[in-house]
Image: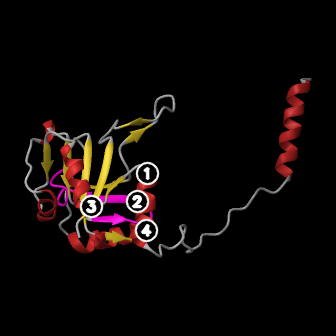
Amino acid sequence: MNVARDNILNRVRAALRVPSHQALPPTSAPIFPPVTNPEARFREEFTAVKGEFIESGDALAVFLKGFGEIATDGSELVGKAIGEANARVSECDLGVTSCDCLVAQTGSVVVTTISAGGRALSVLPPTHLVIARREQIVPDLATAMALLRKRYDKHWPSALSVITGPSRTADIEKILVMGAHGPKRLALYFVD
């Protein structure tokens, strides 16, 4: 007779006699608290995930001077904010795009191939600058998806991305590496 084996089996039998924890039934209650001030919440969450705000036109001019080659999505909104800049995406230091919306609950930027001028501009350059309007802030992801469904209906873009802060990974030995799968920096400028 094996004493260690019997000891383990006795503990298992004793544990099986105790009723297990029962999960609560599903509920329709929201998981997150409601967003009462979307802009304030977006600012809080965006900065928490290491997003950078550019607060004024002067600050934007200083920010842009820090980059050599700049590529833009060619949208009217981006042109209004920074003018013309059409470097090759593969060679630029800064990619500037507009967006579909901004999600207050998570501090995320939602872009599609239509709003970001393709797939590469928001991913390939080391820095991504988003030009947006404050009216584009929505409270949560469900509202963002409803907006996209309404906007694109049956003609969806080929790609949709929800960007939450600069690219990061800690896959290898749990060491945080910025820019592993995309831009190292994510900045946002609101056009008034």
Do callouts 4 and 3 mark residues in contact (Cβ within 8 Å)? no
Q: Amino acid at mark 1?
A: Val
Q: CA distance from mark 3 to mark 2?
A: 20 Å
Q: CA distance from mark 4 to mark 2?
A: 10 Å
Q: Residue at x 82, y 49 (%)?
A: 16
Q: Secondary structure at mark 4?
A: helix
Q: Residue at x 22, y 60 (%)?
A: 57
Do callouts 1 and 2 mark residues in contact (Cβ within 8 Å)? yes
Please state if 156 lies on the left or on the right of 47 as rendered. Answer: left
Q: Is residue 109 magenta?
A: yes
Q: Which residue is mark 2?
A: 107
Residue 61 location in percent, x, y?
Answer: 19, 52
Q: Earlier in the sequence, mark 1 or mark 3?
A: 1
Q: Which stretch did the figure color magenta?
A: 101-121
The disc at residue 49 is: 1
Which mark is in front, 4 or 2? Answer: 4
